[in-house]
Image: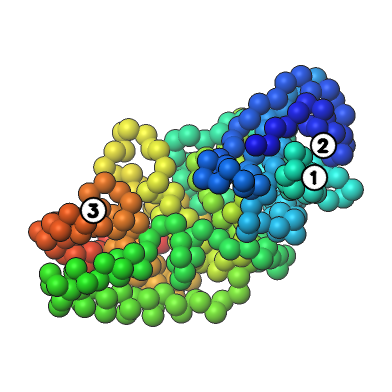
Amino acid sequence: MLILSSQKLTEILNDFNIFSEIVSFSELQRSNYEKYNPASKEIRLIVKAELENGNSVVVRLKNESDVTLEIVKAQSEFAKLLADHGIETPVLFSSDREYARMYTIDDYEVIVTVETFVTGEIRVVTEEIAEKTGALLARTHNIAEAADFHVRNGILFDPLGPNDLFSFQDFQEKKDFMVSLDASLYEEIAAQYERLLQKIRIFEKQPKYAVQGDISDCNLYQTADGTVGIFDFNRCGDAVLYYDAVMQSVFEARLMDYPKEIDGRQETLILSAFLRGYQRERPFTAEQKEVFPCLYAVISAFWDSDIRYGSNSLWDAIEAENGEAVHQWMEKIRSRLTCFPHIPL
């Protein structure tokens, strides 16, 4: 287990040209890779250091199989690019003109970055926050495109590949049971999915640019003047910007915490506000507007929580061999693929 000492933390901060004494430090996050493999040298550790000068900084230490120093440098450079163009982000510190460097600590080879600690973390997404977040995302897209900036890294929300929102493959994995129950309904669902997918793929060959990759309440903060800022570029990579806009908008509208007064209406209200903010800064084309219902339908139909991970999921019903519940799920999925809700763009 990696233990970060005060002496080592001081050395790191000095390397990043921070010479104020450390008053105290604490862990904000630690990934427990050792829990599953005691011999693992993978680590994701985030530490907050309180300094004698009254400031606080965040030190991120990382060793993960899919992360390289080059990727972290590029992610940090993208964050700096956004800041230089007016996007509210934490200030990054550099060491020998680099925003990331390697260290060996307790036999762990770790990539380290240092940034200012920001307050005002957003915990609840209101319509106002959603609209500001949509506008923020659009501005980051405009900046990345104008600079032709790239981060060669995979992202969480690519609708044409494995992603963290939906999965037709998880639905397809249980094909045999569903076909035995109602083959014609299964084939109808699969055929409609393919029809929609072909429409969605129209933007597949568009250029990809760097995106922050994880717009969410836990990665957003609000300054005293109401500006929404963004931090944590851990999932930053290249994406087709239109796909990123749609996937992030649905993510924002479904998986955050919302004010109690909009219970039952939050998805429509938050999604509309997010897209309104985005479109103000980066208007959707007629073609993009036409494709939006198709992509939204596919996301909704094969939503991960409904298909596999949530309570009373389709998979749960199949594992229990509850034919009636499975058939209800199939009917619901067909409906989502064919009945598009009206969401103004």
Whether residue 78 is visible to the viewer of this picture, yes or no, is: no
Quadrant where the image shows the N terminus: top right
| Residue 127 in the image, given as x and y percentages of width and height | 42, 42
Sooner in the amino-acid sequence: mark 1 or mark 2: 2
Per the image, label 3 sits on a secondary structure element best described as helix
Q: Residue at x 74, y 48 (%)?
A: 109
Label 1, label 2: how many angstroms apart (C-alpha)? 9 Å
Outermost residue, right direction? 96
- For residue 316, the mark is 3
Which residue has dot 1 on it?
103
In screen coordinates, is 98 left or right of 232?
A: right
Sooner in the amino-acid sequence: mark 2 or mark 3: 2
Q: Residue at x 75, y 56 (%)?
A: 69
Q: Are marks 1 and 2 in contact (CB under 8 Å)?
A: yes
Which residue has dot 2 on it?
12
What type is the residue that disc 1 sits on?
Tyr
- Is disc 3 surrounded by few (<14), some (14 to 19) or many (20+) residues within 10 Å? some
Q: 88 above or below 295?
A: above
| Residue 2 in the image, given as x and y percentages of width and height | 68, 37
Quadrant where the image shows the C terminus: bottom left
What type is the residue that disc 3 sits on?
Asp
Per the image, label 2 sits on a secondary structure element best described as helix
Q: 220 above or below 332?
A: above
